[in-house]
Each structure stands twice: as structure tokens, then as C-alpha cells.
Image: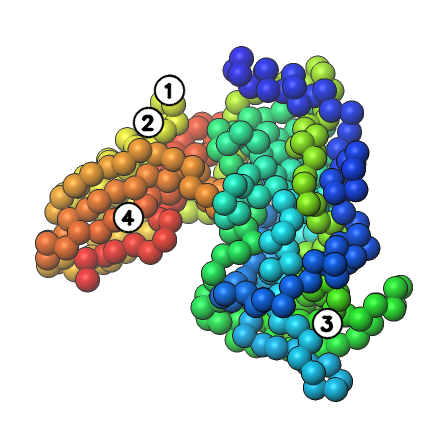
Amino acid sequence: MDNDKKLFEELLKADGITPKGSTESERLTFAEILDQQLEQKQSKPTSRPEIWRIIMQSKITKFSTAAVILIAALSITFFDKTATPAWALEDTIKAIKTFDGIHLSGIKTGDNGKEDKFELWARANEDFTNSEEFKSISDDGNILLVKDGKTFCYDPNTNIINVIPWKCASISPWIGSDLLEQMKKFCDKWEISFGKDAATNKDRIYLTCASTKKNDSWNFEFDAESKLPVRFRQWHNSNTEGKPQIDIQSIVYYDLMPEDVFELKAPENAELIKKFPSADKNQDKDANINSGMTIKDGPIEQSAIEITETYWHAVVNSDWEFAAKLRPSLNAKQRSELYSNSNLPTEIISIGSAYQQDGCTLGLVVPCKIRFTNDKTAEIKMIIRFVEIEETPICYVWGTWGNEYFGR
């Protein structure tokens, strides 16, 4: 608690959250980005196609922002009216990769039709695979901050800062991930169109893509000169119909993200508490007060390791009722049917240390090595979720990070 207090004593020194820098390179407006891109334009193509996927996911106290936004580096080259190659989406990804951070402003529309404005800032980690810091502010004053491997949630209605000991929100993966093959599987249709921005008369390129299987669709607007996205929207239907659930209306790119962006402005008398998030109707729909294990005193990493080992012992011993309690996504019969009689897990070879997996905002990950009856072994990463249900803190096996082997 002392370390958290010390951190927040530093965070609360912030005068505000508007990103401003002392030099032009610290904050780039779109016009500055355009000039910079024209000056630094290079003819060398990217070595591989890439896509950018942003995942914002948080259901903590009253703060709520959720979006899955995909920008695909499709193997498509656009042509202008004279049939001269103009640019490819791979060039957009290449342009974005030069920036340290990003600031998004937009509107989220809930299932009830209520609109909530929000702003989001994020900075990439050292190898540009995920966001290192993350901050989001909703129009009702709720603030979510991810810093130093923890999540801080400020609720102005209660004047409480809730501290959660892992990253509950992130942009993952960051710009530069090689996900083209996944995108080809995910989206089964896309359309390209051209136009001009009514306010600036600048050339625009529009990409509309959709997954009929997932029943989601997206529209992206790119500036034709800078190659950078300037707006995007997401719908929970495959035809971009009605009001979008996510409407990002402004994007600012940072060559160097100012440090004071990731500081939290809150009253000095705000109460700082440690509390696990309340169960979410979507993420924790299978869990109840009888699920998992009650969290014991001590590091949550130890609880994560303990429930992982206990779960695999139950599976090895074919105790499907207990296994279903610890991992409630399936009942006992369904859980047993995942394994054939000849290929049941027979041995726990090793249980690794619990850690924060980049991109996983659900909890901690525990790696395991399991042997099966057919003598095959599998590396399986278990996601351990920590929540409060009926004011009782529990942990349970939420699922796996990556594919899981079932002995076949």
C-alpha cells in the first residue's frame, strides 16, 4: 500500500491531462504529421504485410469502454484515376510505426443506446508489441490508468481510486504485428472507395470490411497523402448499419509521448483501495460464488499457481465435477467429453510462475506442461481470473492463452 500511495502522490501532482509539449516534436497535429511524412517519404517497401489491432477492454466499477478495432494491411494496391499505383495499406502501417504514442477521441454507444464520449492515450512498449502505458477518460469523469503493471480506476462519484494488480486494459498487439493471415480468415469482405474530406477538401480513401461470421464491420478513413488513418468506426453487425458502437473521430500521433500524459488528476483526499474488479456479465458469465477458489492472503501470483495445479490434478484424476468448479466455462460432462478415454492427461510435468502476459487484460497467465496417455506433451497457458462476486474475492480458471491441446 505504501508503494501505491507513493506512486499516487507523484501522479496527483499533475496539473491536467491535455497533452502539450515544449517542442514541436512532442505533439504532432495532423497537419504536422502530413508535412513530416512528405519530407520523410521513402520508396523502400515494407518487408511483410502487417495489421494493427487495438483492443480496449475494461469493465471496472462504473467505467466501461470496449472496442475491437482492426486495421488490415491487405494485399491490395490502390490506384488513382489514371491507373497509377497510389499506395497500399502496408504503407499506412509503416507510417504509424514511426510514432511513440497515440491519442484517440470518440464516442461509445452502449446496448441501451446511451452515448459516452471518451479519450484514450497509449504509449508503445520498447519492442512495439503492446502498449506500455494506457489512459482513458470517460465524459462522466471516470478515469482508467495503466501504469507500472497495475490498473488504477478513479470514480468521481465515490472519490475512490481502485488499484488492481495487473493490466486491465491495453492496445494489443501494437503496430507491427504480423496478423495478415488471421485477418484473411476474420474478414470475408472489404470494399475500397475514394472521396474528399468536406471540411479540408483533402483526398480520402475509405476501407469498409466485415466479418459475416462474427457479425462485425468496420469503416476506416485514411488521408491519401500521409497514409495515416484519421477516423474509424465499428458496428456490431456485418453491414455497417445504424449508429456505430465505436466512433473514433479524432486521432493524434506522437513522435514522443509526454510523460505527464500518464498522470492521474484526482482530489488529494481521494481514497486509495485495493480491490478486484466486480464480476462482469460478459467476461464472467459462467462464474458464480461457488466457482474457483477463495483468494488467500498473500501475492495473487501464488493463488494463480495454486488453482492451476489444483485444476490439473482434478483433470488427471478425472474428477470432472471439481474441474468444472475450478473452470466453470463447461459443466462436468462437457469437460470430460473434451478428452478421449485413450488420451486423458496423465501427468503434470511442470507448473510455471504466474506472470502478466502482454495483451491479456483478464488476469494472470500460468504456463503448464502436461503429459497425455498417448505420451504426447503439451505446453498450455492458463488464464487465471480474479474477481469479486457477492463481495467475496475469488479466482478461477478463465481459459487459455492460445490454443489448448486435448490429447488428440
Q: Of label 2 and label 3, which has the lower sequence position?
A: 3
Residue 95, x across and y down, in percent:
64, 58
Give the camera-side residue of 96 and 310: 96
Residue at position x 79%, y 57% in the image: 35
Amino acid tagged 1: Gly
- Asked which quadrant contains residue 161, the reply is top right
Horizontal arrangement in the rendering, residue 6 relative to residue 288 (left or right): right
Q: Earlier in the sequence, mark 4 or mark 3?
A: 3
Which residue type does callout 4 highlight? Ile
For the residues bearing labels 2 and 1, Cβ distance under 8 angstroms: yes
- Judging by the rendered image, the residue that carries numbered circle 2 is 302
> What's the residue at 46%, 43% (across, down)?
358
Question: Is disc 3 surrounded by few (<14), some (14 to 19) or many (20+) residues within 10 Å?
Answer: some
Residue 185 location in percent, x, y?
46, 71
**On screen, 254 above or below 404?**
above
Residue at mark 4 to residue at mark 2: CA–CA distance: 18 Å
Check disc 3 and report its element: helix, strand or loop: strand
- Residue 105 location, x and y as percent? 74, 49
Numbered circle sitting on residue 298:
1
Gap in Å between the C-alphas at discs 3 and 1?
54 Å
Residue denoted by label 4:
380
* Local crowd size for mark 1, using a 10 Å CA cut-off: few (<14), some (14–19), many (≥20): few
Residue at x 67% of width, y 31% of height: 259
**Mark 2 surroundings within 10 Å by alpha-carbon count, few (fewer than 14), some (14 through 19), many (20 or more):** some
350 relative to 190 in the view: left or right: left
Question: Quarter of the image holding residue 64?
Answer: top right
What secondary structure is marked by label 2?
helix
Going by the numbered disc 3, the residue's amino acid type is Ile
Query: Mark 1 or mark 4, which is nearer the start of the sequence?
Result: 1
